[in-house]
Image: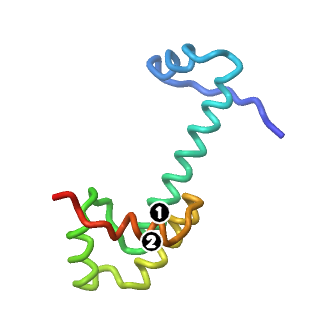
Amino acid sequence: MSRRVTISVPDDVAEQLDALPARQVSAYVTETLRRRRKSDDMRAALRAAGHGEYPYDPEGAVRRLASRQVTPEMREAAIARVAELLERPVDDVHAGFDRPSAA
């Protein structure tokens, strides 16, 4: 089922939509909103687990974990939620979080 909605957007966004084939605008907007919702849900899950909005910083994460700012249980819950949102196995998400930094 679908509904027709009318929205107002800034000129620069309207230009992006105008550049799409008319039959693809709804699909584009739908995909964009779904990605945004998934991203927002992921950030909320991480915040709920005690994570702040940090840049990629594995050493910092290890320090925060070691200082108990983030309990192991909170970290595991966050990783499980991220895996669920990404529709990926928990072990794969763990590997991404646990990889050594390139520094």
Residue 21 figure quarter: top right
Please state which of residues 90 and 60 is positioned toward the viewer in this rendering. Answer: 90
The disc labelled 2 sits on which kind of residue? Ala
- Mark 1 falls on what kind of element? helix
Q: Is residue 97 above or below residue 30?
A: below
Please state which of residues 22 and 101 is positioned toward the viewer in this rendering. Answer: 101
Mark count: 2
Q: Residue at x 50, y 64 (%)?
A: 82
Please state which of residues 17 and 82 is positioned toward the viewer in this rendering. Answer: 82
Q: Position of residue 23 (x, y in %)?
A: 71, 20
The disc labelled 1 sits on which kind of residue? Ala
Is residue 21 found left or right of 62 in the rendered image? right
Is residue 23 found left or right of 43 in the rendered image? right
Is the residue under label 1 in contact with that under label 2 (CB below 8 Å)? yes
Q: Which residue is mark 2?
A: 48
Q: Position of residue 60 (x, y in %)?
A: 21, 69
Q: Is residue 73 above or below residue 17?
A: below
Q: Is residue 7 above or below residue 64?
A: above
Name the outermost residue toward the left: 103
Q: Tell me if mark 2 has few (under 14), some (14-19) or many (20+) residues whose alpha carbon lies within 10 angstroms of its own.
A: few
Q: Position of residue 20 (x, y in %)?
A: 59, 17
**Which quadrant of the figure contains the N terminus?**
top right
Q: Position of residue 57 (x, y in %)?
A: 24, 62
Q: Which residue is mark 1?
A: 44
Q: Residue at x 49, y 60 (%)?
A: 42
Q: Residue at x 67, y 31 (%)?
A: 27
Mark 2–mark 1 Cα distance, whole angstroms, equals: 6 Å
Q: Is residue 78 above or below residue 35?
A: below
- Mark 2 falls on what kind of element? helix
